[in-house]
Image (spheres, grey):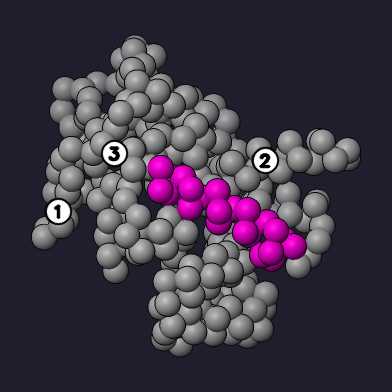
Amino acid sequence: MTTSTKSTLRLFVLALACLLFASGCASTPRQADLNLGYSLPKHQAKDVLKEGVRYPIDVYDPIEGFNRRAYTFNYYFDKFLYLPVVNTYEFITPDYVEDRISNFVDNVFEFNNFVNNLLQFKLKQTGVTLARFLVNTTVGVAGLWDPATGWGMPRQTEDFGQTLGHWGVANGPYIVLPIFGPSNLRDTTGLVVDSVAFSTVGPPAWVDSDEAELVFMGVSAVDKRHRQSFRYYQTGSPFEYEMIRMLYTSKREIEIAK
C-alpha cells in the first residue's frame, strides 16, 4: 500500500470515526424521496426535552444554507453507505462480541479523556481515568471487559471542545460538518486537535503500525454508529434540523458545565 493511499484511507476512516452524533439537512429532501409523512409527530417534546434544562432557542447559524445542504448529504451518506455497513456488522457479529468491541474501543479512547481532564485540572477525574485504563487493560484483558465501572470508577468522558468551553471559549457559529455531523467552531477545533493528538502521541503512535491504526479507526467508526440510535428524518417533525441544532447546542452546554 503506497503512502498516498494510506493517507487517503486514514483520512476517510478518521472522518467516519469522528462521527459523534448523526446529523445533516439543508433544504429538506422531497417528501416522496424520503417516504415521510408529517401528519403526526412520532415523538412528543417530553420525550427529548428534560425538565429544568435551559434550551437555546436562537442558535447562531450564519451559514444555515450550507449547513442544511450538509445535513442532507449526511442523510444520504448515512442511509446508503454508513448504515448498510453497520447493519451488516450487527447481523454477523454476536451481541456478546459487539460488547467486547465497544469496551475495547472505549478503553483505547481513554487517552483523550485523560488528556482533557488533565487540561481542565480535574485531578480527581484524571486519576479515575488513569485507574480505569490500568484496571481494564489488565484485569479487563486489553479492555475487552470493563470491571472498573463495577468497581466504582465510571468513565469520565471529555474532549478538547469541552476543554475549550471549560476555559471560557464560546461556541462560535453552528456548523454541520459533512460526515462528522452537528458541531460549532469551537467543537470543530476540538475535534481536529483531539484527532491529531490521538494519532500522533496517542495509542496509534505507540503501536506504530499504519495498518493497525486503519483497522482500529474503521472498527471504532462502525462501533460508534452501532451504538447511536438516531436515524435521520424519523422524528416525525418537519423541523428536525432546528431540533437537532437546539439539542446539540444544549447537550454541549450541559457537558461543559458538569
Which labelled disc corresponds to residue 54? 1
Q: Residues within 10 Å of mark 1 (few under 14, many from 20)?
A: few
Point out the stretch of residues depicted in magenta: 185-205
257 over 143 or under it: above or below:
above
Front-most of residues 45 and 73: 73
Q: Secondary structure at mark 2?
A: helix
* Residue at the spot of label 2: 11
117 over 10 or under it: above or below:
below
Q: Secondary structure at mark 3?
A: helix
Front-most of residues 165 and 87: 165
Q: CA distance from mark 1 to mark 2?
A: 37 Å
Mark yes or no: residue 208 visible: yes
* Residue at the spot of label 3: 245
- The mark nearer the N terminus, 1 or 2, is 2
Give amino acid for label 3. Answer: Arg
How many numbered circles does the render carry? 3
83 over 171 or under it: above or below:
above
Most distant residue in the right direction: 1
